[in-house]
Amino acid sequence: MESEAPTGTSLGTDAVRHVVGLVDRAMPFTTVTTRVSPATVWTADVVAHVRAGADPLAPWRSALHAQMEQRNAATVRPHVPAAFVLQWWCEVAASPMAYAAVLGPWLLVPSGAGLGFELAPGLDPFRIVITPERTSLAVDDDPARRLERARTAYLALVSEVVTAYAPDVRMGSRQRWGVVGDTWDTAVRLARGAAGESVGPEPTRVSCCFIYAIPGMRECAACPRSGRATRVPGSAPN
């Protein structure tokens, strides 16, 4: 399912480049760019493989699993890389869209063919690529409505992969859709911090990254294992 273009007049490619530049300067650790490279993996290609019945993120999980075991000199449960890869997949779409919606009146909606990513040596996405010619940009002056529209477009981009994700790992709907909701909420919170807004303490997550399962590691401060979770996890869109 391709993401829907924003209603109203879509701004041009120069405006998309401008907003992508603003998002890039606001985001720490991750580059957001309009420049494509041979290493770019396109969201649309991942979705196409899923629709064909394949598991296109399996090599990513496998490589991360091997790297985690090598770095920690210990056996790592496959749930750990599976959780990390699913979160990173969602972050590729959530981060630029949430930052654009928070930093200004922009509803930035790349199509699956216009949103790509590249992996760092640590196998996390360190570069997000947005193609202006395949991205819609509109202005919505209502902050709450703008964020909700951005969230809807985000769900459209990630949901097919989330639904079919990780057949080799048992992952319930609460974990899957908890990752989707947690990733969006975290992106919005980080964007608000970048915009100079007060964000308060990090809320308890619904999903878990299972990092505590690696010897010598401890659970995150927002880990749902604390028992303080109150937010209802996101559910699959209709």
Image (spheres, rainbow, N blue to C red):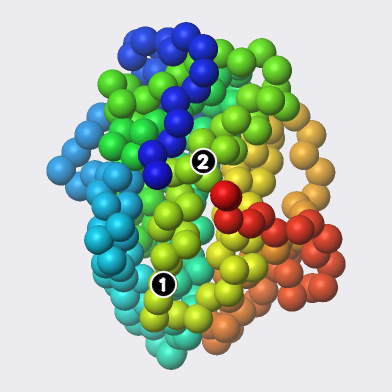
- 162 vs 65, left or right, is right
What kind of element bears circle 2?
A: helix
Q: CA distance from mark 2 to mark 1?
A: 20 Å
Q: Nearer the viewer, residue 73 or 116?
A: 116
Q: Nearer the viewer, residue 78 or 193?
A: 78
Q: Nearer the viewer, residue 23 or 113?
A: 113
- Which residue does the numbered mark 1 point to in the structure image? 166
Identity, as a three-letter code, of the amino acid under mark 2 = Tyr
Q: Position of residue 123 (x, y in %)?
A: 35, 61
- Which residue does the numbered mark 2 point to in the structure image? 154
Q: Position of residue 2 (x, y in %)?
A: 38, 39
What kind of element bears circle 1?
A: loop
- 137 vs 195, left or right, is left
Residue 76 position (above or below residue 21):
below
Neighbours of disc 1 within 10 Å: few (<14), some (14-19), many (20+)? many
Identity, as a three-letter code, of the amino acid under mark 1 = Ala
Residue 169 position (above or below residue 24):
below
Residue 50 position (above or below residue 33):
below
